[in-house]
Amino acid sequence: MTLLKAVRGTRDLLPPETELWDRVETTARRVFARYNFGEIRTPIFEDTSLFSRSVGEETDIVSKEMYTWEDRARAQSEKSQSLTLRPENTAGVVRAYIEHKLGESGLLQKLCYIGPQFRRERPQKGRYRQFWQIGAEVIGPPSAGSESPLRDAEVLEMLASFLDELGINGWTLVLNSVGSSTDRPKYIAALREALKDKAPQMCADCQRRAETNPLRVLDCKVPEDQPIIETLPKIADFLDDASKAHFAAVLAALDACGVRYEINPRLVRGLDYYTRTTFEFTHGGLGAQNALLGGGRYDGLSEMLGGPRAPGIGFAMGLDRLILTLQAAQAESAPTLADAFVAPLGESLNADALALARELRRKGLQIELGDGGFRLKKSFEIGNKLARNIVLLGEDEQRSGILTVKHFATGEQTKIPRAELAQALRNS
């Protein structure tokens, strides 16, 4: 019988790795809550047209990477519907904003999410066909200040705080402006014209993108193409005065709160809905594909989907790549161990050992529980791998209420009254 395995491009997340995932998600929820974000949960599949209209027909995501199928009609009178597993979450959030008339409150909607996304792409380190994202969107009517550059700067400052609190050092915030909905078409036209003679000298992907989505040419990582890309027109030369003023105000606000950044005129991001501010947080530990997270402003997306005018800005971070960065940092530090391993000295003491473990856990300690069927040597071997201390519970300890505790790092063995045990373990 063939052994069943996870489908290529997917994976199982197992302990202790899931502890890191929980830490990232908990930190995100805690930090985002301080900025008054609330969590939204949208379906993992949507009508295909949501993504073709928002992300763009000519993007790689829509043209090559989506998992799409025809949902059969349930009755002869019904039409079948094309459905797609979500390849990104911004479009779904904006669809929910429109559908539930969230703009009618007249207030900014600050929405965050955590969940899986799906793209049919070549699996590689840190990139999977089912991948997890944490993201957030700030969207609302212009009267609520949704167009303000202050919103952009606040989101960026929040992300800087999140990465700092997560313990990720050495990140770089990279910024650019792709201009308004009138700036961008002019730039794309100039880019397409410049690529007419140069695209044939570039990689196969760039040759295709030069026609279908010229902005994606700027994302190319092929070393031989970089000198050509450097000669292409820069978006900064096509910005109108309002877009320049907006970007300058974003930078001024970041300067005021001490968030460091770099400007990269090639950072344009390939999704059709982006306008004005675009950004990435990068980290050198990830190699050439070094983005931890990215996002930008999308002032016309709601209208593109048939909704009211509702400018917005948002971001998404891939947890898989974020976890890689944390694992690299964790590899340089000592492993996290439980506070104690409770070892009953005989099967008749198993129940009492469980009661002791429960008592310590309820006082906030992390406890591993052994088994009275283990030989003492085995209990010490297992305990040394899992915990900082071993607590021996034999018949003498049970009668006297004085526990034998050994600290593995120092080899020191002491007798501790049960009432003082939790504090002693906490201080060890």
Image (tube, helix red, strand yellow):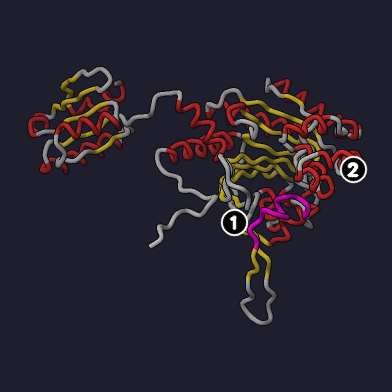
Q: Is residue 328 left or right of residue 203?
A: left
Residue shown at the point (18%, 20%) measured from the top left: 413
Q: Residue at x 82, y 39 (%)?
A: 201
Does 202 lie within the magenta span? no
Count how many numbered circles sit on residues in the image: 2
20 and 104: which is toward the camera: 20
Q: Nearer the viewer, mark 1 or mark 2?
A: 2
Per the image, the residue denoted by label 2 is 196
Indicate the position of residue 129 as horizontal and vertical percent values: 58, 50
**Residue drawn at (77%, 47%) of the image:** 273
Q: What amino acid is at disc 1? A: Ile
**What's drawn in magenta, residue-wise?**
57-68
Q: Quadrant of residue 285?
A: top right
Identify residue for label 1: 44
Q: On residue 375, which mark appears?
A: none
Residue at (66, 26) in percent of width and height: 172
Apparent side of residue 45 relative to residue 347 in the rendered image (left or right): right
| Amino acid type at image mark 2 | Lys
